[in-house]
Image (tube, rainbow, N blue to C red):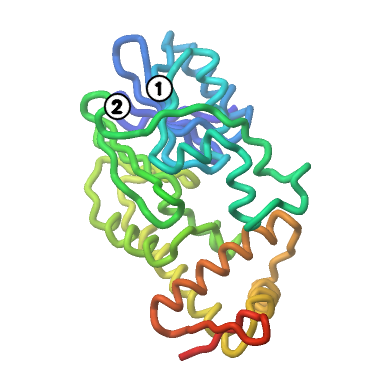
Amino acid sequence: MFQLIQCAANTYYLKCFSNIGMYDLGDGTCVLIDSGDHKKSVSDLNKAIESRGLRVRAVYNTHCHIDHITGNRFFRDTYGCEIYAPHIETFYIEENLLEPNYYYLGVPTNRKRNFFFRAVGTKCKELTPDVLPAGFSLLPLPGHCYNMVGIQTPDNVWFLGDAVVDKTTFDSYHLPLFYDINKSMDTLRMLETLEGACFVPSHTPATDNIAPLCRHNRKALLDNKAFILARSDNRTFEDIFAAVTHDFGIDLDMDKYAKLTFTVRIYLQALIEDGVLTASLEDGKLVYHRI
């Protein structure tokens, strides 16, 4: 069973693969921050909610990725609660075809079994400051996704979505998913100075000091930039991708291929923005050159 951990007076999180936040509003209801990555985490959280005699008033999704929204439909159907997400993220939560098409830049080659087709589309409303209970606040966290946000509870606990990932994620996956590398680095610099009593990233335990993990993440992104740049001179994208995945020792399957081709393109774009790489079309091929 996943463990429900108390961060502060009324703020809790379910420690699981994608941590779920819960805030007890003190009137017999609670709100959730994200809703779980699979049925087990959803079930365990609901048992904890029921044991406290609470009802879910609302679910606030930090962003649209499937491991943060799996329980949306369950909690809505069980409690009649509203589901909220930031602008743009709402479209991807409501239409489960958009995310896999986004990674594949078209119809996925393995769409009958693709993990991203397992999400159940759920109607949701836009998450804005005015829909939050008193004492809550939102913080834009660009970089990992289109319009991800952090959410602060009245206990001064920050839920940070995937703005920061644990060290083993970089060690194990090498290239965790980001939508914009340079914006992610800006977000990490901002988070290093963010004040709070407790910080809850989605994929690592809560901490009272997020700065060291932010610095580790920034270094890992810089190291990945250098790693990819070193393999990007006078090469097509396909050659760069093959070299990067080979040298990282990544064992590819169709789902990894989709996410990693997307991610490597994002790194290449960041290097172009840095002014150290350029790209041109040559004989119908996209070729990258170091400057």
Task: Describe the element under mark 1 as helix, strand or loop.
Answer: strand
Residue located at (53% from left, 33% from top): 94
Residue located at (48% from left, 75% from top): 225
Residue located at (28% from left, 32% from top): 153
Q: Nearer the viewer, residue 99 or 139?
A: 99
Q: Earlier in the sequence, mark 1 or mark 2?
A: 1
Q: Nearer the viewer, residue 202 or 283?
A: 283
Q: Nearer the viewer, residue 163 or 149?
A: 149
Which mark lies nearer to you, 1 or 2? 2
The picture places residue 233, in percent across and down from the top left corner, at: 57, 89
- Mark 1 Cα shell of 10 Å, populated few (<14), some (14-19), many (≥20): many
Instruction: Quarter of the image for the N terminus: give it.
Output: top right
Residue located at (39% from left, 29% from top): 12
The picture places residue 43, in percent across and down from the top left corner, at: 59, 22
Q: Is residue 62 above or below residue 226?
A: above
Q: Amino acid at mark 2?
A: Val
- What residue would you read off at disc 2? 131
Labelled pair 1, 2 in contact (Cβ < 8 Å): yes
Q: Amino acid at mark 1?
A: Ala
The picture places residue 126, in percent across and down from the top left corner, at: 38, 33
